[in-house]
């Protein structure tokens, strides 16, 4: 009997060089007795050769051949030009974020393939497959903010680098998940004064236990947030999700009170106006910041792609355990509630509650 096949694809998005699995993790799938195909030059930009994948037991193939696998793996969602490869009966898994992508949702329904989103893998209220990228995104948010505080880039001219005698930049972080905590750790290490806003008292206790007196932790109340935003040199948005129906937390009037040259980094990068409506469109790695009413806005929707070597290694090591569960379900008839919960499309239907909700909202008021 022919072995079930797995195809690993090269990413083609702008500024995207990450790869989902490195040779060490590919070897694990080969040892699980799958026919593993890796698209040629999938990790060449990381300095990893096709020979390294071949030595791990994979076959090096074309993009078309990889798409013909029983289970296709990607880091990020397919691009529109890749939708033509979707086919009924196949399985596709990636960090999809399809709920904000109407064209992708439509293609998933039309093609009738079965699709899974790693970001929806959940366990005890957490999203373990996304931890690595979330951590990197939080750290990169502070690094981008620190760089753009330079006066020749439009910033306030403050050094976030523990300079003797200060002044020490004020960093306000909204959200205390993986992104927010990583941002706080990095800002503290650079000598900033850090304030974190959280949604409940339980989170305050957790943050105080982790950081002690190195941060101020406050409940997210509009009046208190307004005063802290006014004093901030850097504002980092790190809530879990923001969509076109998310109430505004930091509105345009609040942003207008910030000091000229302050920096806002929206790590959440939702869609629609969301919690930070002063800046709806995204920026890019090539043009990271946009000056709006004297405040620099940074909204790069794939910050970890700035450091693809680090991100690929961290994600490959973390996600392989879930890929193995996925292969067992998709290719060997296994059962897993965890994998079932991250299924987003099957047999021409959207099946995940978030996609169903956003598809209905898109019908009433288009996202784009």
Image (cartoon, grey):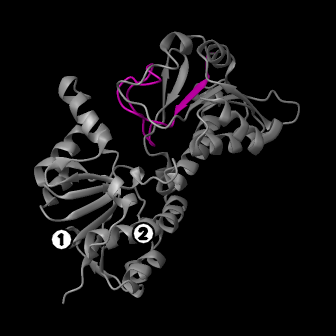
State left or right for residue 255 relative to residue 328: right
Q: Residue at horizontal 33%, vertical 71%?
A: 327
User: Residue 229: x percent and y percent?
Assistant: 63, 19
Which residue in the protein does label 1 denote?
68
**Residue at image mark 2:** 21
Magenta-colored span: 259-287
Per the image, label 1 sits on a secondary structure element best described as loop
Residue 270 colored in magenta in the image? yes
**Of marks 1 and 2, which one's residue comes earlier in the chain?**
2
Q: Secondary structure at mark 2?
A: loop
Q: Quadrant of residue 106?
A: top left
Q: How many marks on residues? A: 2
Q: CA distance from mark 1 to mark 2?
A: 18 Å
Asked which quadrant contains residue 101, the reply is: top left
Q: Give whichever of 170, 261 is nearer the camera.
A: 170
Residue 273 counted in the magenta span: yes
Q: Which sits in the foreground, 129 or 339? A: 339
| Residue pictured at 19% horizontal, 87% vertical | 2
Q: Residue at x 76, y 38 (%)?
A: 208
What secondary structure characterizes most of the magenta part? loop
Residue 326, given in percent of the width and then of the height, sits at 35, 67
Image-based side of 188 in relation to 118, left or right: right
Farthest residue in the right direction? 165
Q: What is the x, y in percent for residue 24?
A: 48, 78
Quarter of the rendering occupied by the C terminus: top left
**Circle 1 residues within 10 Å: few <14, some 14–19, many ≥20:** some
Quadrant in which the N terminus is drawn: bottom left
Label 2 environment density (alpha carbons within 10 Å; few <14, some 14–19, many ≥20): many
Q: Kindly indicate the quadrant of the structure image that contains residue 57.
A: bottom left
């Amino acid at each position: 009997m022919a072995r079930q096949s797995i195809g690993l694809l090269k990413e083609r998005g702008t500024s995207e060089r990450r790869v989902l699995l490195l040779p060490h993790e590919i070897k694990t799938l080969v040892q699980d007795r799958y026919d593993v195909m890796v698209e040629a030059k999938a990790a060449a930009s990381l300095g990893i050769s096709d020979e390294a994948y071949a030595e791990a037991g994979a076959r090096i193939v074309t993009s078309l051949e990889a798409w013909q696998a029983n289970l296709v793996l990607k880091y990020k969602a397919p691009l529109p030009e890749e939708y033509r490869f979707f086919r009924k009966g196949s399985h596709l898994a990636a960090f999809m974020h399809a709920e904000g992508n109407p064209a992708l949702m439509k293609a998933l329904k039309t093609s009738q393939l079965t699709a899974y989103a790693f970001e929806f893998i959940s366990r005890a209220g957490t999203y373990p497959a996304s931890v690595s990228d979330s951590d990197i995104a939080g750290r990169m948010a502070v690094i981008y903010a620190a760089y753009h505080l330079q006066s020749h880039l439009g910033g306030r001219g403050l050094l976030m680098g523990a300079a003797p005698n200060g002044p020490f930049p004020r960093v306000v972080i909204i959200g205390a998940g993986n992104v927010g905590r990583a941002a706080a750790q990095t800002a503290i290490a650079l000598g900033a004064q850090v304030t974190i806003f959280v949604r409940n008292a339980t989170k305050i206790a957790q943050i105080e236990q982790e950081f002690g007196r190195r941060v101020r932790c406050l409940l997210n109340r509009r009046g208190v947030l307004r005063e802290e935003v006014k004093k901030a040199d850097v504002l980092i948005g790190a809530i879990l999700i923001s969509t076109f129906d998310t109430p505004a937390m930091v509105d345009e009037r609040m942003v207008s009170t910030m000091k000229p040259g302050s920096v806002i980094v929206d790590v959440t990068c939702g869609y629609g106006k969301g919690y930070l409506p002063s800046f709806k469109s995204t920026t890019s790695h090539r043009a990271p910041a946009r000056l709006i009413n004297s405040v620099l806005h940074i909204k790069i929707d794939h910050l970890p792609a700035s450091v693809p070597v680090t991100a690929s290694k961290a994600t490959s090591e973390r996600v392989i355990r879930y890929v193995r569960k996925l292969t067992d379900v998709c290719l060997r008839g296994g059962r897993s509630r965890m994998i079932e919960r991250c299924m987003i499309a099957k047999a021409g239907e959207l099946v995940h509650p978030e996609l169903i909700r956003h598809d209905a909202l898109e019908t009433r008021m288009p996202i784009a």
